[in-house]
Amino acid sequence: MDANRKRQFDKIRVIVNLLIEKEGRFLFTRQAPQAPRGAGKWFFPSGHIELGESLKEAVKREAKEEIGVDAEFVKLAGYTEYIKAPYHVLLLLCRCKIIKGEPTLSDEIDKVEWVAKEDFRKYQIRPIMKAAVDGGLIDEILKD
């Protein structure tokens, strides 16, 4: 990559996406209108991995922050990238399970739904998740 292209990006962001399944459906959350990014868009619960934080720690923290549940990491199911200046995002798709609680709303999340994978494309989803869904990665990961 040449130096000019590198200057288009401020940093790489590493995000965990929580793929939480219940009775054949997956948890989708919708960003509230006042959310800083993605207002009105749907996505799996997700968030940045913080410096010094392990993948498993990030999953646990984001589950609590985003949807108010205790969850545990099951496995790394796959990854995708979204590279469009100024964003360079590495999205880690993590199979997780809720061990305590039910998903709740927050300042940033105004709706939660359990969605069958064949219905993912019916929702207005965030660009990074769209890359995973439209690119077939989600279908590949969830085929088992």
Image (spheres, rainbow, N blue to C red):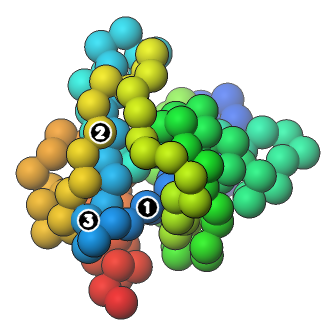
Q: CA distance from mark 1 to mark 2?
A: 12 Å
Q: CA distance from mark 2 to mark 3?
A: 12 Å
Residue at the spot 42% in from the left edge and 41% down from the top edge = 103
Can you see residue 103? Answer: yes
Q: Secondary structure at mark 1?
A: strand
Q: Nearer the viewer, residue 131 or 85?
A: 131
Q: Is residue 57 above or below residue 74?
A: above
Q: Is residue 46 above or below residue 121?
A: above
Residue 56 x %, y % = 74, 59
Which quadrant is the C terminus positioned in?
Answer: bottom left
For label 1, the crowd category at 10 Å Cα-Cα, with few meaning under 14, some 14 to 19 and many 20 or more, is many
Amino acid carrying label 3: it is Arg
Q: Which residue is mark 1?
A: 20
Question: Residue lying farthest front?
Answer: 100
Q: CA distance from mark 1 to mark 3?
A: 8 Å
In the image, taking residue 87 as reference, residue 58 lies left or right, namely right
For label 2, the crowd category at 10 Å Cα-Cα, with few meaning under 14, some 14 to 19 and many 20 or more, is some
Residue 102 x %, y % = 43, 45
- Which numbered disc covers residue 112? 2
Residue at the spot 30% in from the left edge and 13% down from the top edge = 33
For label 3, the crowd category at 10 Å Cα-Cα, with few meaning under 14, some 14 to 19 and many 20 or more, is some
Amino acid carrying label 2: it is Val
Amino acid carrying label 1: it is Ile
Q: Which residue is mark 3?
A: 25
Residue at the spot 34% in from the left edge and 53% down from the top edge = 27
